């Protein structure tokens, strides 16, 4: 594929913009659907969309081939995503304001780096610990509403579910860390395996009731722009990119854009503690990425000064 940075930025920007709207879509959809119902109809839409994309790309033959290569991995993957992760995520959004649930789930990348040490055999780096301290300080700020000396967590279950989301999402990426298959096909396999579990859970808790038009529209939006199509946009952005750093750094805009949509569409008044906590979480994520680059940079400067 011919590299095209402008096209990569367009795809990446589209993906980030779509991801920025989904927290609002979760909250609005949950006014009409239970968490398990939202998951069922969103997963159905996503599975159909991913299946269509795989067929249009001429990769249908890869579905069975990839599953046969590593069936246990895809069974684990489907259990985690979409079943457990989104069931817990939607439960979290049902209990918490969107402005609180959304920033907390962004800490998954920090937890992933910590879990990768025992589960993937990676080395624990100082910057991972620094990032964890900064990011989870942001979690405390959001959970306490900025009242650090008067800790009164409004919904301990909601915050517990938010942190459980980060664990499940981290485990999903750890399971798929060594997946050598086509990423879109792998995601489709996860949904094909997870969908029967989602169906059974929804049937058990809520029965199979057809929701109203607003609920169906919200589920369709979530299925397309959170679970399926946006993932393909992001992959295209990375494939077209001449330099990936500008593309990946765009992700840091998403949580702040998301607060704008939450305020505008959901009608929540964004608390100052939410901005402060989110700033700490994003600072932790940035330090995790940029921190390891500072040491080589210092060495280069020392070497240059020594040669003068």
Image (cartoon, helix red, strand yellow):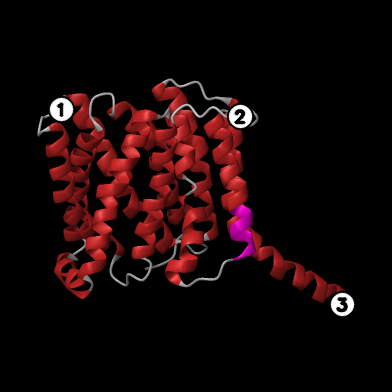
Classify residue 239 by image quadrant. Answer: bottom left
Q: Marks 3 and 2: CB-CB under 8 Å? A: no
The disc at residue 120 is none
How would you rate the neighbour count of disc 2 (Cα within 10 Å): few for under 14, some for 14-19, many for 20 or more?
Answer: some
| Residue 30 image offset from top left, x and y in percent | 28, 28
Q: Mark 3 and mark 2: span between their CA atoms?
A: 47 Å
> Is residue 26 found left or right of 268 in the rendered image?
left
Q: Reply above or below: 172 against 208.
A: below
Magenta residues, start to end: 125-131
Q: Is residue 297 left or right of residue 5?
A: right
Q: Residue at x 61, y 34 (%)?
A: 276
Dot 3 or dot 2, earlier in sequence: 2
Foreground residue among 109 and 139: 139
Instruction: Name the N-terminal-most of marks 1 and 3.
Output: 1
Q: Could you tell me which residue is drawn at 76 percent across and 67 percent down?
A: 298
- According to the picture, the residue beneath numbered tag 1 turns out to be 211
Mark 2 and mark 1: span between their CA atoms?
A: 38 Å
Mark 3 or mark 2: which is in front? 2
Where does residue 201 sit, x and y in percent of width and height? 17, 42
Q: Which residue is mark 3?
A: 306
**Closer to the observer: label 2 or label 1?**
2
Of 170 and 211, which appears nearest the observer? 170
What is the C-alpha distance between the residues marked 1 and 3?
Answer: 71 Å
The residue singled out by tag 2 in the image is 146
User: Is residue 103 among the parts visible in the rendering?
Assistant: yes
């Amino acid at each position: 594929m011919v590299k095209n940075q402008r096209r990569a930025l367009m795809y990446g920007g589209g993906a980030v913009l779509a991801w920025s709207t989904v927290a609002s879509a979760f909250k609005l959809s949950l006014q009409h659907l239970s968490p398990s119902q939202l998951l069922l109809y969103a997963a159905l839409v996503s599975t159909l969309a991913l299946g269509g994309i795989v067929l249009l790309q001429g990769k249908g033959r890869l579905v069975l081939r990839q599953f046969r290569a590593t069936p246990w991995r895809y069974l684990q993957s489907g259990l985690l995503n979409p079943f457990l992760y989104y069931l817990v995520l939607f439960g979290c959004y049902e209990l918490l304001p969107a402005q609180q649930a959304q920033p907390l789930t962004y800490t998954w990348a920090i937890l992933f780096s910590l879990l990768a040490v025992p589960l993937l055999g990676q080395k624990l780096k100082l910057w991972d610990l620094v990032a964890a301290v900064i990011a989870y300080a942001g979690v405390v700020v959001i959970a306490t509403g900025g009242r650090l000396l008067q800790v009164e967590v409004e919904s301990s279950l909601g915050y517990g579910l938010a942190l459980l989301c980060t664990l499940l999402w981290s485990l999903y990426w750890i399971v798929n860390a060594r997946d050598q298959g086509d990423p879109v096909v792998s995601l489709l396999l996860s949904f094909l395996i997870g969908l029967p579990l989602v169906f059974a859970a929804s049937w058990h808790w809520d029965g199979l009731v057809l929701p109203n038009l607003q609920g169906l529209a919200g589920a369709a939006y979530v299925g397309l722009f959170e679970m399926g199509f946006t993932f393909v946009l992001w992959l295209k952005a990375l494939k077209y990119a001449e330099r990936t750093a500008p593309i990946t750094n765009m992700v840091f805009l998403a949580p702040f854009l998301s607060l704008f949509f939450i305020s505008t569409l959901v009608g929540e008044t964004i608390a100052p503690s939410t901005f402060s906590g989110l700033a700490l979480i994003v600072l932790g994520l940035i330090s995790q990425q940029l921190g390891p680059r500072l040491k080589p940079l210092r060495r280069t400067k020392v070497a240059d000064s020594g040669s003068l």
